[in-house]
Image: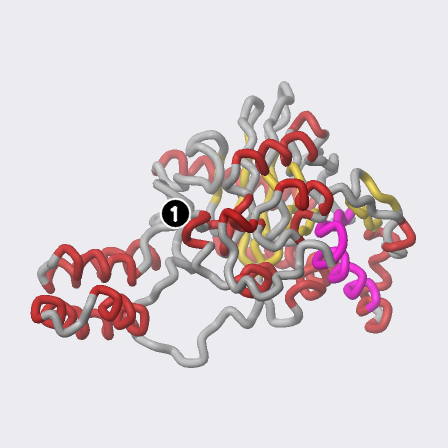
Amino acid sequence: MVGRDFGYRGYFDRESCDLNEFKVLTSQNLTLDAVPHACDIVNNVPIYDMVALRPSLEDPSRRRALMAEWGHVLRDSAGVIALKRAYADTAVIDRASDIFRDIIDAEKASAAGKGDHFAAAGANDRVWNSLQKQCLRDPEGFALYFGNTALAAAAEAWLGPNYQMTAQVNQVRPGGKAQTAHRDYHLGFMSAEESARYPAHAHEVTATLTLQGAVAHVDMPVEAGPTKLLPFSQAYGPGYLSFHDAAFRDHFEAAHVQVPLEKGDALFFNPAMFHAGGENRSADIERMVNLLQISSAFGRSLEAVDRRAMSEALFPCLLRLKQSGRLSVAELDAAVAACAEGYPFPTNLDTDPPIDGNAPDSQADLMRRAVAEGWTCDTFTRTLAAQRTRQAA
């Protein structure tokens, strides 16, 4: 497939990014014969009528055939599916919207809910971890909302069973500006330089670990700014580097598509697809979307390890080994990597938000800084404790 021939290059770099190749890849057209379960195609996005297809989800063989088609589209074809009337009863959506608006008002009053990815803070209303907050405030409403066979089938089509659901509400008011073009979690939350440290095969694997979803809580014509998408872009190998490039972003702005959504519709797309929240150019539509960030069950380590306790025990030894010259900077870094948590997620994005970037510091980031700057053991221990409080609050 175009965009997946990594050869023996091993790693992507800036020279791997070829705009002309990207343009050819994203100039494909999807036809209905390639998506036999779809009722229509709008701007290369296959549309599935879930009122007609919902009975298929109750039959194991027909459900499997539909999920196979969705998985193919998400990986090897357009990269996105739209599920019309994923919620046959939109009263369930309205009930959840009322809960989310109450949360937004409460968090505004408490100055919580700060920070956003790929958009300026304050440009919208964001509810981090809307999944847990909705469940604790209205467990029955949560059951009605997530007891949805269409959402479950879409998640399983990409991730298999035992997936992990998370969600974040985004409400963009009239005049709210568009996001910049990006890919998403995991490598999409890194700089081009950081993502280039991961081997080329990891760039493909990362996209199989998460699925992006969006449930429309209001009718969203194009002027309200539904998600801007570039179909087929998920197949571009060095895309986690190239979306940072101005020329690629300019092409995205020229070539992207948008699909109008109605309340109760759902959109799912490969996290490697170039996408961005659109500008809300409407006069009076507050665009509310529940963004689903669904993760594979495989994103877990084999053993439970207390890395904070390990880090506190190791830190004074690293200081001594650095001072004595027995370990080089590279060797110290390797020791930190084996001990401390190198990834800042999962975290509590209300108390540990991405204010100055797309991700907060990891435990390993703090440990490397502490070693480099010669912190005292007490300062390091207190810093780790404060981080743990932010992550778990």
Taking the spot 62% from the left edge, 57% from the top edge, the residue there is: 211
Counting from the top left corner in percent of width and height, residue 164 is at: 56, 64
Question: Where does label 1 land, which residue?
Answer: 350
First to last magenta residue range = 65-86
Q: Residues within 10 Å of mark 1 (few under 14, many from 20)?
A: many
Residue 140 as seen in the image, left or right of residue 372? right
Report if residue 79 lies within the magenta region.
Answer: yes
Picture quarter containing residue 303? bottom left
Q: Measured along the vertical axis of the image, is residue 78 above or below residue 362?
A: above
Taking the spot 54% from the left edge, 26% from the top edge, the residue there is: 176
Picture quarter containing residue 369? bottom left
Counting from the top left corner in percent of width and height, residue 52 is at: 88, 53
Taking the spot 68% from the left edge, 35% from the top edge, the residue there is: 256
Report if residue 83 lies within the magenta region.
Answer: yes
Q: Secondary structure at mark 1?
A: loop
Q: Quadrant of the N terminus?
A: bottom right
